[in-house]
Image (cartoon, helix red, strand yellow):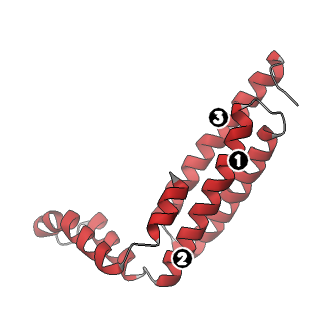
Amino acid sequence: METIGGLLVLFVTRELLDSFVLFLAAPELAEDSNDWVSNYLGSAIQRFTDDTKYFASIYLVIHGLIEIFLVAGLLRNKLWAYPLSLWFLGAFIIYQCYRFTHTHSIGLVLLTIFDLVVAFLIWREYQWRKTHGRLII
């Protein structure tokens, strides 16, 4: 999903985002011009530059491709895939936290929470597999 989403981001224009947010936010703004979500989305679009688009696209594609490779190892119960997956997720989480200090992006927060949940599940599975001896080197 991330890899496909990253590729689709390349085709998103600011005008398309403006139209989409206007469609979503117009009813809320008509009721309350101080609606936090609608105003946040509007200001986020104003910060959406070509550099932002390319960064988001490349980041999502790389993140997705690495995860595809690691998931293939996890599905095959390869011992190396568990710590390597945790290492990569940890690196992504640290980088996302660093980027958040500069961008304050809710998308980064959501991606980081998702990565934390996945890392926890991988760790739990790794512990279970180690105790039950079902790992292949």
Residue at point 42% right, 81% down?
47
Give the Cα separation between the discs numbered 3 and 1: 17 Å
Residue under circle 1?
Answer: 69
Where residue 35 appears, as percent x and y from the top left, is 23, 66
Q: CA distance from mark 2 to mark 3?
A: 30 Å
Expressed as whole percent of the image width and height from the top left, the position of residue 25 reads 21, 66
Residue at image position (66%, 49%) is: 67
| Disc 1 residue type (three-letter) | Phe
Q: Earlier in the sequence, mark 1 or mark 2?
A: 2
Which numbered disc covers residue 54? 2
* Residue 63 placement, left or right of 134: left
Which quadrant of the view contains residue 3? bottom right
Q: Using the image, tell me which numbered label, if any, was put on residue 45.
A: none
Q: Nearer the viewer, mark 1 or mark 2?
A: 1
Residue position for label 3: 121
Are the residues flagged by discs 3 and 1 in contact, CB closer than 8 Å? no
